[in-house]
């Protein structure tokens, strides 16, 4: 939020308080209803397939569209955890005390530029790639409310989020495909999206 926007909202609440102090609860209610109305938001869980997610990640060049930071293919992150579990642990339930911080900082996720709960559409025109960390921070806030902006999409031919490494390593080590269904799903999705 900009300081001007906060000041304007704080001024509205000051006017409400003045009306309440003078005993005019109706006026206080009218000020709020007109100048700073309550807008209900609904939370709806959304799940995207690996293919849907990868299409967005490749489109955005594995770049966090809010910060410009590079992000890493989800399969590559989990593969690192499978190969180096003590140095790069991942808890299946995302327990923070058992999961490397890199999963929150570098794991790409889909975010809605305009939150669906605030009237945004749930389609690829309203989707951007961001880290799990920034996705959690943004929640149901608009970019204007947070004072955030977007950066241009990256180029997946220059940074593919370690996708090629992930595919190559999985090809060389087929036992990992058999032992880890999660990795197998991301590998299949990666092959499909890269083949489109």
Image (spheres, rainbow, N blue to C red):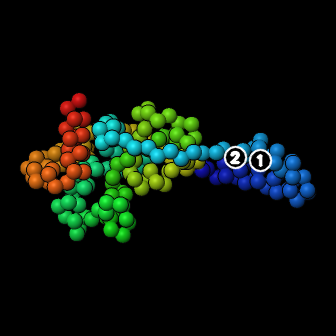
Q: Quadrant of residue 37?
A: top right
Q: Is residue 24 visible?
A: yes
Q: CA–CA distance between discs 1 and 2?
A: 8 Å
Q: Position of residue 67 (x, y in %)?
A: 41, 49
Residue at the image point whose x is 81% and y is 48% from the top: 29
* Residue at numbered disc 1: 32
For numbered disc 2, what is the local secondary structure? loop
Of residues 38 and 137, which is closer to you in this image? Answer: 38
Apparent side of residue 107 relative to residue 151 in the rendered image (left or right): left
Please tell me whether mark 1 sits on a helix, a strand or a loop: helix
In the image as oriented, which residue stretches furthest toward the left? 172
Q: For residue 124, what is the image quadrant?
A: top left
Q: Is residue 85 left or right of residue 103?
A: left
Q: Which residue is mark 2?
A: 38
First in sequence: mark 1 vs mark 2: 1
Q: Are marks 1 and 2 in contact (CB under 8 Å)?
A: yes
């Amino acid at each position: 939020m900009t300081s001007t926007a906060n000041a304007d909202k704080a001024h509205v609440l000051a006017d409400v308080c003045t009306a309440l102090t003078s005993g005019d609860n109706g006026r206080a209610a009218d000020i709020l209803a007109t100048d700073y109305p309550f807008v209900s938001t609904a939370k709806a869980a959304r799940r995207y397939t690996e293919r849907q997610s990868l299409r967005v990640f490749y489109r955005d060049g594995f770049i966090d569209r809010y910060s410009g930071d590079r992000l890493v293919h989800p399969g590559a992150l989990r593969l690192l955890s499978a190969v180096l579990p003590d140095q790069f642990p991942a808890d299946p339930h995302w327990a923070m005390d058992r999961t490397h911080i890199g999963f929150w900082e570098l794991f790409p996720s889909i975010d809605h530029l305009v939150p669906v709960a605030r009237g945004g559409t749930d389609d690829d025109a309203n989707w951007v790639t961001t880290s799990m960390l920034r996705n959690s921070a943004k929640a149901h806030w608009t970019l204007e409310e947070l004072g955030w902006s977007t950066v241009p999409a990256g180029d997946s031919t220059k940074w593919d989020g370690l996708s090629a490494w992930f595919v190559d390593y999985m090809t060389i080590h087929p036992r990992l495909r058999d032992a880890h269904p999660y990795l197998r799903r991301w590998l299949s999705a990666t092959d499909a999206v890269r083949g489109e």
